[in-house]
Image (cartoon, rainbow, N blue to C red):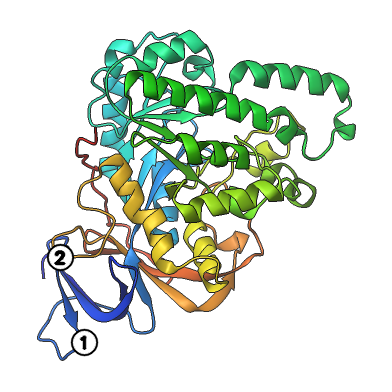
Amino acid sequence: MAEGNLLVRGGNVLQADGSLRLVDLEIQAGLIKACHEISPSSWDGLVLEAHGLTVMPGVIDPQVHFRDPGLTHKEDLISASRACLRGGVTAFLEMPNTIPPTISAEALEAKLARAAAVSRVNYGFFFGACGDCSNLEALKDPGNACGIKMFMGSGKGCLDCGDIDGQERIFATGNALIAVHAEDQERLLQRRETLLKQYPNPAERPPDLHSQVHDPEAAMLATKRAVEFSNRYKRRLHVLHLTTGAEAEWLRHHKTALISTEVTPQHLLLDSNAYALIGSHAQMNPPLRTSADRELLWQALLDGVIDCIATDHAPHTLEEKAKPYPHSPSGMPGVETALPLMLTQVALGRCSIGQVSNWMSKKPAELYGIKGKGVLEPGWDADLVLVDMEHSRPVLREELVSRCGWSPFEGWELIGWPVATVVAGVVGYERGQFNEACRGNELQYDKII
């Protein structure tokens, strides 16, 4: 049989309405051809047995940092895309803060070429906005980028877009989607200076000092400003990794059709108490908040105020994470654990499997206009994951594929681990074994404005 031809036999296949149906999926040339009721088949090609498993659309992770090029001691496109396969992620959108940063057509093309050669899953990339507005002309036509990334706060080097006038100029230029890291840079710098003076001795700094430096007001200031600019310039806006209940409740009343947002599993399942348990492994930007914030984020997600889930996969080595604050870097890995973390919430009755698939597959595809992805129907791309909803397994450091080699969820007992992951009809991962010949494709986007 030709590559991309596959029969997924005997699984409970998730339907577009959120129900499960016992059917075979017939895949030809990387596309779903038909969904058959279970019956004797004349298929004589490759078969993937799915008996006792749930078949879902592959996860689309719309925010990752894969560190390639320039920071590949933390992660690279090979290790990251293998981690994606293990986690049931069949497509990703990667951020521009690499070395060099993705702020030119040449840098974007270099990333696309690298991914075409080595990525085991489908791939797309953001185009970075420069804080000094030196690449405004390039932002008018960012090529086959999924959108523009703006670091309103926490940006480094040329990607620091903390200047408010510069932010407005970026919103006023071009018409591509703008995804913002919504923290107010001026407030972050003031908070950091003030609080570090209060605790000059690193040994006396409270475990959650990072969450105090990156306080909720810094997030709210930036989110409100981004929405103001979106309204003023009729610009498609995506607010990345929402963290505070106050932002979620404000957006409940101020979101327009041009505005969307996301949340990470970390901010749904961890809070600032985690610092006392796992130290700097809990440090990320924007930071973990209170348990009350977690509950408000959950409610906003269930209500549709928050549109989708992303991991913000941002790995650092254990040695880097062990540095004293504020020298410990912010970020944590996530692509291997996000799906089982959320499916464990299904098993606990917090949400349905249809909702998880909507948040992690269908909605990311819709928000970014990704063609052919997000549902399992005839004519759509055959990107899918088979998960085990009957048995649980712990997160074990020795089993992790990400180069950084750790997880903030180490030891958590999770259900819904991927048993097999399929990319364009090719089995890229099955029961702990990787098909190193599996390759993803460059994502294509419909105009979404």
Q: Which residue is mark 2?
A: 378
Residue nearer the viewer, 399 or 157: 157
In this rendering, position of residue 362 left or right of residue 69 = left
The amino acid beneath tag 2 is Pro
Residue nearer the viewer, 358 or 78: 358
In this rendering, position of residue 306 left or right of residue 20 = right
The amino acid beneath tag 1 is Ile
Q: Which residue is mark 1?
A: 38
Q: Quadrant of the N terminus?
A: bottom left
Query: Residue placed at 28% from the left, 11% from the top?
Result: 137
| Vertical comparison of 364 with 427: above or below | above
In this rendering, position of residue 58 left or right of residue 320 = left
Q: Quadrant of the C terminus?
A: top left
Secondary element at tag 2: loop
Query: Residue placed at 68% from the left, 42% from the top?
Result: 289
> Residue 194: image x %, image y %?
79, 18
Dividing the picture into quadrants, the one containing residue 329 is top right
Secondary element at tag 1: loop
